[in-house]
Image (cartoon, rainbow, N blue to C red):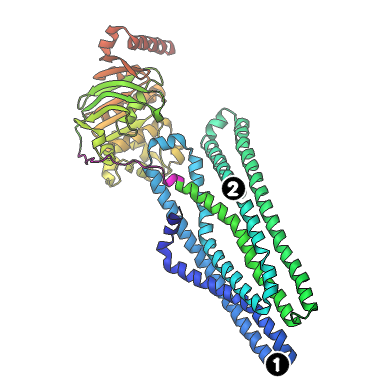
Amino acid sequence: MFKRFLSYYKPHKKLFALDMVASLLVALIGVIYPMITRTMLNDFFPDRNYRMIVIFGIGLFLLYFTRMLLNYFIQYQGHMMGVRMQAQMRTDMFNHLEKLPFSFYDKHETGKIMSRLTNDLFEVVELAHHGPENLLISGISVIVSFVYLATINLWLSLIIFACVPLLVAISLFTRARMREAFQERRVSTAVINASVESSISGIRVTKAFTNAKKEAEKFEVGNEQLCEASRKAYKAMGQFHSSTTFITDVFNVVVLIAGGIFLFRGWIELGDYSAFIVSINVFLGPVNTLIRFMEQFQNGVAGFERFVEVMDTPPEADPKGASEAERMNGQIEFCNVTFAYDGDRNVLKNIDLRIAQGKTLALVGPSGGGKTTICHLIPHFYDLQQGQIRIDGKDVREITLDSLRRNIGIVQQDIYLFNASIRENILYGRLNATEEEVIEAAKRANIHEYILSMENGYDTVIGERGVRLSGGQKQRLCIARVFLKNPPILILDEATSALDNTTEIMIQQALDELCKGRTTIVVAHRLSTIKNADEIAVISEGKILEQGSHSDLLALDGMYASLYRQQFREDERSL
């Protein structure tokens, strides 16, 4: 993991080197002050050498001015290096997230993923920037100041340095507890982010059902969890800081007592003792910085571990030996297909289906029977446990994922539209399409006239998830997107089930136009919409119970006929 962390420094080697040089110079300038103090106390003041006092004073001022410039460089350029590293990590994680399979998103909430992409990486980059600087500046300062203290009085320096192992031991003892606590706090932060994301996304449902109180209760569960995790983290941090601060305070007591004894016995001169006291602060300052660095280190390591956890999730990959597919004809076969999510109970059991090129297959049956799963397996969103799915006689596992999915268009009940213009949302079907092609797709989806009636036409921004459009308008926009894609295979997964009858008729006309000349799989709730399908399969509990045309299934007088009669009676009652 350490090598992976270091790899993000590579593009910024020159800037990192300059940052380290600047940090080294800052550390060296920091230890010059006690040296000048000792010289003035022992030599210039007793000798009344005012000229050298002024020269050394001006020199010290120039050094401090130089240190100011160096600190500016460290704070500005050093932070910018960290920002660029963070941007690269964000890019890497985002690109990796785009490649992860459906199964990853089945298990991880959006808010938690966002927390890793933002909060966690901020902590990582703080460590990436300040970590090397703190270690270098503080490390050099500790070594140089100790060497200098030893030149003043070796034995007094050794007495002081004897306290350091105790400080290290306490730091190591409390560090592990603090690391665990901050890791737990980070997890809790992701939980509350997920809760907020879910509640805000569903704010219209919350208001419609007047359930703000319920959402507040759900939020408070995560809020309390974060508070408790923070309490544990800050308790561990408090124990860490209070114990280490106590040891550093002991340094001053030791210097006062031991130095007084050395001065009383004549083992050290007053000027040297004064310089020693000043130099002790130069020694203790970086020691305290290193102690504080432990907290930053814990946060950064915890954040990077969570970053690595996502990056180590295997992405979707083209099967070995997979080949690129050109435009497909669209003949689809399911051969003894068995499938289960995460190795759980089988959702599909020994499914055999054949859909001829350009024909329409409708899937009907009770919810949870496996209809949508069949639709998800055709674009190879999930891997099979058993059997084969072949398109034009070729196993989908032998086709590259991109080329397979370019040949498949999907219209679902839950339409996702981006917070962008109407044009950009339609262009999602084929990014390099011309303006004329976009307009033609909109016309075929029966939404062109409505778009022109809007104030900004195709440049109208439709809001998050298309909130400014009605259900039917969103559906037609999605249909226009698929028209633009122009795939040979079309999947309609309950595309009209959430619409009213009038809108459904309008949308159905667009869908009928979309289906022409394409191999189509339709998942339908309203059986009246699929009466003209070439073939209908009744799916229940992962099995095909009945299969045939509408008239064949009615004559069979099985589940399909029962569902149809029940729905026909409901339609009559609604009139």
**Is residue 529 among the parts visible in the rendering?**
no
* Residue 310 highlighted magenta (yes or no): yes
Quickly name the residue at label 2: 182
- Answer with left or right where residue 113 lies relative to residue 233: left
| Dot placed on the residue nearer the N-terminal end, 1 or 2 | 1
Q: Residue at x 63, y 77 (%)?
A: 148
Give the vertical position of 187 relative to 43 (above or below): above
Task: Identify which residue, 561 or 475, lies in the foreground.
Answer: 561
Q: Position of residue 102 (x, y in %)?
A: 39, 36
Give the vertical position of 353 relative to 224 (above or below): above
Query: On residue 49, which mark appears?
Result: 1
Instruction: Write the start and end of the magenta stretch as one range.
Output: 309-326
- The amino acid type found where label 1 is placed reads Asn
- Answer with left or right where residue 109 lies relative to residue 443: right
* Residue 113 highlighted magenta (yes or no): no
Task: Identify which residue, 209 or 473, lies in the foreground.
Answer: 209
